[in-house]
């Protein structure tokens, strides 16, 4: 039950914070329950959408425990074990295992100038040190290097990797991996909010969409339609979700970075939907102002997630 | 005595490891004593050359304690508090203060997609949380964003920053900062091994050269010559050190990344000089092979750091 | 008849050269006739696949005249008017009009450090100077800047642009343009060989695939299947063409760049198929060697473009 | 007399334009005479500062003829033969030779995806085709690839290259070339306006500073001081010129690119100094507005190039 799902929708959970920037247990429990009720196939804690790079070790394990407690074995809990290089990732992995993770998700090294020749040793050492299924997380926008298809396929064949989360946005790279692992059952998840239908059509096993926090039902419908081969239905759902995703850009870019905007907007949407209590994001992210928060609500109305009158 | 030196040579210490990849206390003590005897003006622990990105929290504080113990207040000990974003950096900073750091050195956020609008809040929050002098560490090659001169100068004027370590390799950027802080006493250190004389001539206060582990006497001579205005002497020393620095590229780049090569070569040189016991580097770095290690010794002989017969 | 087609397959023609690197009239005529017989909807001369960056002005107009002569109004002839900035592009455009172009295709400025604020003026001046339909060519890999969706949509609304060729490989960017021009009839062509079916499904009007030189029938079948809504047929064709496209990577990258490999492989395939006489590419591209040329033929056999016995 | 100078100041001339954007003969003649009177050692026509990427072939040769006519053999005239790949560069080179160039200056290929494996063949073919001294122009900011030191040194040893213009801004790269060609007399010129003194101190032979159009006397003084070993004098001159160079950033970057600003400011300064008649720059560059033009004059007053009263 709690090993890696080989398909489905696995949202990367936001980490709700109190105004004092502590992990907000009740909000996170409500968020988790809402995702489970929507029919998601797994829960990804301490991913980029979960502000993993901002959370202290204590906050990371607290978020994980809360989610694992609510999940209670109904679906697997994946934990991002995000740190700069192998020994630090192994410590994150051991902590994640101890606090309820069913599956580990690790990137290539970052900050340290790294090289593809070093990636195999990195994942092998993590897998050897902590006995849980291991998913490689390809996120060049954050780690500034690419996990090439050959590396992933080799490590899959060795039994080091149990899956891939592709957040590269590069469909040709997705094809390259899928071509190499075809027929092996190795699951490849797309982290794209906006190319979900296309990724499934290309052969991806499942989805890890950040805005799935806000509209999990939409992604579950999209995924199920795709599984039934109803690609036009999936595409219409994707079109709606692509419009909804524009709320991520609601923040004024002269005042803040894109990530302050996106995470702030996801959280503000969850506040508007009554799921979490506060839209606070971690330091040093810039907070949305009143007009930006109002704009988030407009997107929710347009996506039929909020009734018009409540806007 | 133990506040930030406003000038001088502050080598970023290698972190010697045992073959089992534990911090090697005796080797690190010998390295520290050798640097002090060479007349360095400060000691920078857990910087990039110290494999900070690879060291666990425990290894980081252990290295810091060992160096602070040997330094015993003779020169300030700077500690790199390197982590992805503000709350995690603050935890690193508190630990560093508790384990003997005199000064903190922090980069811009990384991994998390970051933005210049967020840098001021980042450094302000660190400075407010932990009461030690704070040096900004501009290292775009690792964090993939640039600390612009205006940000540094503003934070200097506010009293948030007490200094800058410029590892950008961009002399025009160095000039831009120096122009803005001229006359304020704000110290700017260059992290370049090969543009040290030029950086001092442009107005930099001091040097943080990785290969200063191997030849601290050379950088102290270079620095002292520059202070006396003997620029030709400084330049000749720099020319010799630039040739020595080529040992950083001794590793075969089809087998390993540039950092595996450089850190491996620094450590191998320290082994050859009898300073540390093992050349082992952290995972997932690739280790130098016999011919690469032999090539390191050739560079040491050419730089007159080893007698010819011992080659 | 000869204005811009609003949909369909418009291959970017290779420019066959003699061993002395003159434009090979007879080979180019045969290539053009083969494409017309395959049912393509337009012909794109002096694009990147046509080695436009290598061809002298005289060779460019000669290639255009040859193709326009064979086309004889059956389908429109698009000409790449590729140069560094506006005045030079206008000269290219005037020459292209004089030598038979029906439509002009122009990129953002390059070499000159350029900026989005300057793009509108660039395309307006070209359109004002030479009275032919104008297609913007978004090719960030070559010009190192991106034509943002808003710029394209604004210029479309002004009547400056008559279409877009998107060679960015960025499906999210393609969506962004398509969202802005929906319902206006503004045609958007994808330059991707490997995401053709997906691009059409997202709403692209047509295709400009480099390897369409080698297998025009395949892309016409893919396109026609997509138009009929037979997406599974289109996808199977795309899967086959994606495998065929791997021949572009046949060259040894330690000896040559990726473009030497790709253009060399396209031309060698056309030689193997009896369409052109020589595989010679322009200076300073590196030529394929015997084993690389043999590998090209293997791909053609696998794609059923050559009988097995002829391999 | 007219072969490549092995040292000295060789300004890259602006190309004055009439309001109708024709080459302005009288202004260009005045500019050339002023540079000669200031004691420059060569004249570089159709470089980046000369808007080469914007000038038609006819405008390029016209600018060259005008400058060569005024130079009349007093100093060598270098011509930028800037185009995308080898055959087109050779045509530019033949035209430059026919219109009075003494020396050719060529970059690596651009627009065409290029590769270091192809650079040797590129320069060899140019040198073989047109019998004039050939200078390699390393300008990664424009061509998006780097001429590595080994390639330059090899081609120097072969007799293909007669010099290097380094506009990379990378002093470590400059050192790498200088180390490889030491003792051969191969001249290396720095294109940096702001690191001129430092580059000469590192061993560069001469300078090609864009703002040398505005203050040629300053760069000649700087150069002569450096030759006499009066490095403090050179540095003070450089400090003044670095402040002057800030006028390049006078344009509002929300309205225009950095190049529109810099070239516009150089030309406006020449208008203010009475050297040329119009500040017009090529399309699609954005023109400076009144307040930006006024700011240019303020810089000239601060640099003592204009009397205070004329501001």
Image (cartoon, coloured by chain):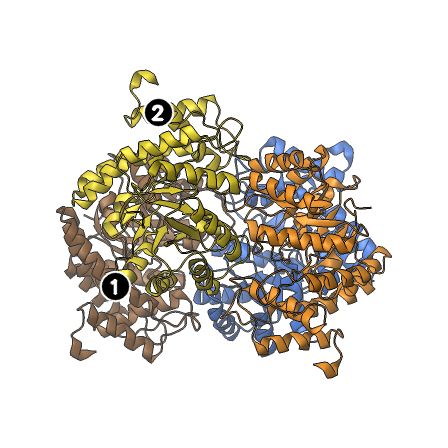
Chain colours: A brown, B blue, C yellow, D orange
Observer-nearest residue: A213 or D126?
A: D126
Q: Residue at x 55, y 67 (%)?
A: B97
Residue farthest toward the bottom in the current orientation of the protein: D309
Horizontal side of residue A31 vs D57, given as left or right: left
Q: Residue at x 75, y 53 (%)?
A: D69
Residue A126 drawn at (x, y percent): 39, 44
Q: Is residue C131 above or below residue D182?
A: below
Q: Is residue B212 above or below residue A151?
A: below
Residue bearing mark 2: C273
Q: Secondary structure at mark 2?
A: loop
Binning the other alpha carbons within 10 Å of mark 1 as few (below 14), some (14 to 19) or many (20 upward) gives some
Q: Which mark is residue C57?
A: none
Q: Is residue A13 visible?
A: no
Horizontal side of residue A302 vs C135, given as left or right: left
Observer-nearest residue: D71 or B45?
A: D71
| The quarter of the displayed image where residue B209 is located | bottom right
Q: Which mark is residue A243?
A: 1
Residue A222 drawn at (x, y percent): 18, 54
Between disc 1 and disc 2, the foreground one is 2
Observer-nearest residue: B81 or C92?
A: C92
Horizontal side of residue B93 vs B202, given as left or right: left
Q: Is residue B89 above or below residue D308?
A: above
Observer-nearest residue: C22 or A43?
A: C22
């Amino acid at each position: 039950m709690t090993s890696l799902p080989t398909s489905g929708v696995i949202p990367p959970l936001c980490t709700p914070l109190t105004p004092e920037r502590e992990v907000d247990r009740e909000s996170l429990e409500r968020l988790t329950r809402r995702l489970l009720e929507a029919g998601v196939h797994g829960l990804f804690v301490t991913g980029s959408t979960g502000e993993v790079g901002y959370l202290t070790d204590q906050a990371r394990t607290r978020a994980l425990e809360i989610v694992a407690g609510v999940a209670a074995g109904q679906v697997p809990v994946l934990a991002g074990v995000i740190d700069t290089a192998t020994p630090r990732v192994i410590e994150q992995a051991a902590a994640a295992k101890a606090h309820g993770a069913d599956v580990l998700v690790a990137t290539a090294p970052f900050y340290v100038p790294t090289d593809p020749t070093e990636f195999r040793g990195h994942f092998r050492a993590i897998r050897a040190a902590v006995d849980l299924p291991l998913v490689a997380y390809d996120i060049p926008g954050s780690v500034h290097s690419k996990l090439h298809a050959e590396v992933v396929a080799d490590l899959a064949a060795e039994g080091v990797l149990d899956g891939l989360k592709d957040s590269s946005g590069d469909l040709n790279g997705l094809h390259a991996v899928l071509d190499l692992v075809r027929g092996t059952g190795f699951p490849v998840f797309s982290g794209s909010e906006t190319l979900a239908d296309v990724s499934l059509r290309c052969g991806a096993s499942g989805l890890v969409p950040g805005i799935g926090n806000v509209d999990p039902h939409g992604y579950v419908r999209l995924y199920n339609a795709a599984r039934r081969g109803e690609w036009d239905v999936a595409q219409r759902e994707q079109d709606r979700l692509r419009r909804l995703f524009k709320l991520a850009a609601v923040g004024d870019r002269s005042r803040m970075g894109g990530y302050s905007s996106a995470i702030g907007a996801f959280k503000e949407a969850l506040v508007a939907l009554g799921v979490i209590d506060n839209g606070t994001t971690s330091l040093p992210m810039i907070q949305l102002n009143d007009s930006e928060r109002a704009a988030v609500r407009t997107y929710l109305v347009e996506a039929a997630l909020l009734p018009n009158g409540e806007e």
